[in-house]
Amino acid sequence: MHMTSSLEFPLLEETWDMVDRSTIDVELFRKVWLHCESYLHSRGYTLAYRASEAYRSIYQNYPAIPRKAPEDPFHPQFDEAFCFIHDRFKTIREPENVRSTRFPTPYAHPALDSRGRRVILKAVPASSMELKVIQLLSSEPLRADPRNHTIPLLEVLDAREWSIIVTPEWGFSHWERCASVEEYLEYARQLFEGLAFMHQNGIIHGDIHDLNVVMNMLENNRSGVFDSVPRDFGPCGAKYAFIDFGESHIVRTEDEAIQHPDEVRFHPKAPAPELLKDDPVNLFSCDVYAVGALLRDHIKPFGSIEPQSPASILMSSLPYKQVIDAITHEEPQRRPTAVEALALFEGLIHSTDLTDSIIVGTHVSKSL
């Protein structure tokens, strides 16, 4: 699929782990990537930044490269776009180019592949758990499983003691701007289906928050005004995926998922309450809480809430709030598992009226 070359990854004076991550200097982040720009180009990738002549050339010629709409974004084909483009003024099913929304970090950089499709390059130590996890999730039979809601792995580039993970660039989920209650609930269902799938395969994500969930659509939003209009995802429908497995674990038993909070790195936005205490924690349960907190904290759309908007309907729905309260319970032993949480949301989806369900323990059942 990519250009072949005998060019080897260059020796670097400084590598990604030597970059000062406390700075917000984008050019400093890019410095290490520029050292290996020729190597990346030989493998069919062009770093996406405005000063790059190669990037500008691909950007200008992008519409001339034919692409089919993606039939299954979790199994991207060479002649397909990776995802759809949503325009505020019209819904575009034919893929077109928009500049990357991702800025370089010490470890990741946006790029274009040989067909002008947007990808993310991420450098990880070759022996890292992150590489093991994403390779496992992209191996068969896991990748073929429809419950696998993780970003597909395109390839891994050898970078001496480092590896460069190549994945499609999908857009941030923008869940709070869903156009219908059904779209809200399907988003939640897919997240818990994906989480249950990972947990059943012994994988703990460990870093679930709004920036680590993406969807198979990129927004062409020049105006800066966000809306909740219906979006056309084509026959494949809206798909959501987890990304970034830098804090992930692979465990063989439930006991291996028990760790002391001092040994756990977690995102400061909405950590599970037990992570702030001094007792051992179950990382599976922490994952469940993280998805629940994401759903709880991002239901409010930008600006005012329309009385009959999907967000307003859900915020006033007792069954929905009961489910959210259950999966974000302060006591982890009273939280449902990911499989049980999935069943709760499937119950809400199949309910004809969100007001006709009641909570029983940590389960939702229909009132008769």
Image (cartoon, helix red, strand yellow):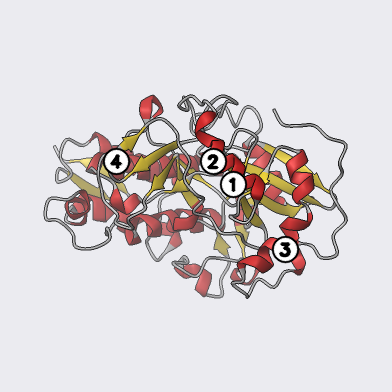
Q: What element carries label 2?
A: helix
Q: Name the residue under label 4.
A: 183
Front label number (2 vs 4): 2
**Residue 56 marker:** 1
What separation in Å lies between label 2 and label 3 (alpha carbons)?
25 Å
Front label number (1 vs 3): 1
What separation in Å lies between label 1 and label 3 (alpha carbons)?
19 Å
Badge 1: how crowded within 10 Å, few (<14), some, or many (20+)?
Answer: some
Badge 2: how crowded within 10 Å, few (<14), some, or many (20+)?
Answer: few
What separation in Å lies between label 2 and label 4 (alpha carbons)?
35 Å
Q: Where residue 177 sits: x, y (%)?
A: 29, 51
The amino acid on which the numbered mark 4 sits, given as a three-letter code, is Glu
Q: Residue at x 75, y 38 (%)?
A: 43
Q: Mark 3 points at which residue?
A: 31
User: Foreground: 23 or 49?
Assistant: 49
Q: Where residue 191 sits: x, y (%)?
A: 43, 44
Q: Residue at x 23, y 42 (%)?
A: 180
| Discs 1, 2 touching: Cβ within 8 Å | yes
In the displayed structure image, the side of residue 115 where residue 157 appears, left or right = right
Count every numbered label the image shows and give the total: 4
- Nearer-N-terminus badge (1/4): 1
What separation in Å lies between label 4 and label 3 (alpha carbons)?
41 Å
What separation in Å lies between label 1 and label 4 (alpha carbons)?
36 Å
Badge 3: how crowded within 10 Å, few (<14), some, or many (20+)?
Answer: some
